[in-house]
Amino acid sequence: MTVYLGGGGTSQQEAALWGPMLAGRPRVLYWPFALDDGMLPGAESWLRGSLEKFQSGLDVVTWTSLEGHHRAEMTGFHLLFIGGGNTYDLLTHLRAHSALDWVRAHLDGGGALYGGSAGAILAGASIDIAAWHDENGTDLITSADLAGLGLLPGRVLLPHCTAADAPRAEEWAARHGLEVLGVPECSGLVVDGDDIVVSGPDPVWLFTPGGTTTLPADAAVPRGGSAS
């Protein structure tokens, strides 16, 4: 399982993440389901332009909805790209089509995943922390409703994070029993099986009820997860 999680910056801010994630992965499937309807028409053009800065000749396919698609159609795609927008809308769309399992099957089959901002929050144990940035206009209310992909066991991911978020993030971790990985816009995480490494260039923060740990570029994130 190889997963790339960005803090919600531009492709250049996340260059340390985007370069490696595209190496040897020419077929990209884009799910822009977190975007509002007005942004969907320009979504593929934006992604193509961003990817071209790192690698030319990529085969990019965009599904603006899962309606009419099936999990088997994902076979042959090397990278699933899930970008930013409203995390609640993203998860609602995936749940409506039982597509969280599609993502897991893609990873189990050797495919890679990129999640940026909303897509990165989705990777965690819960998307509840999305309330820091997103309005919840959906029916997702309970802890079960808000469960994410679970690729960061016992942890959630907070994108667009700054050092000033530490007190609030520590309190959130204590209240929810989940550690918080705070990822700034100029950084990201690479998840390879059970190993998580900071891509940099900026550090990532691990917020727990007991305090904050600063993790510089190339640092391994300590294993663990459940806050107490």
Image (cartoon, rainbow, N blue to C red):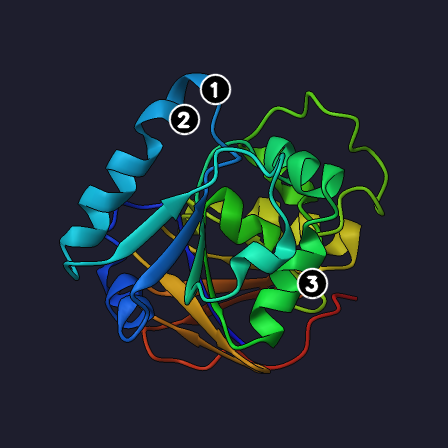
Q: Nearer the viewer, residue 205 or 38?
A: 38
Q: Nearer the viewer, residue 144 or 211?
A: 144
Q: Is residue 158 among the parts visible in the rendering?
A: no
Distance from disc 1 to disc 2, alpha carbons, whole Å, reads 5 Å
Residue 125 position in % (x across, y down) = 70, 58
Residue 159 position in % (x across, y down) = 47, 48
On residue 133, which mark appears? none
Q: Is residue 170 left or right of residue 97?
A: left
Of marks 3 and 1, the one in the foreground = 1
The vertical placement of 43 against 75, above or below, is above
Residue type at mark 1 is Asp
Q: Quadrant of the N terminus?
A: bottom right
Q: Contact (CB < 8 A) between labels 2 and 3?
A: no
**Mark 3 nearby-residue class (10 Å; few <14, some 14–19, many ≥20):** some
Q: Contact (CB < 8 A) between labels 1 and 2?
A: yes
Circle 3 is placed at which residue position? Answer: 150
Circle 1 is placed at which residue position? Answer: 37
Circle 2 is placed at which residue position? Answer: 40
| SS at circle 3 | loop
Q: Nearer the viewer, residue 62 or 121?
A: 62
Residue 37 position in % (x across, y down) = 48, 19
Distance from disc 2 to disc 3, alpha carbons, whole Å, reads 27 Å
Residue 15 position in % (x across, y down) = 22, 60
Distance from disc 3 to disc 1, alpha carbons, whole Å, reads 27 Å
Between disc 3 and disc 1, whose residue precedes?
A: 1
Of marks 2 and 3, the one in the foreground = 2
Residue at left offset 75%, top offset 47%: 98
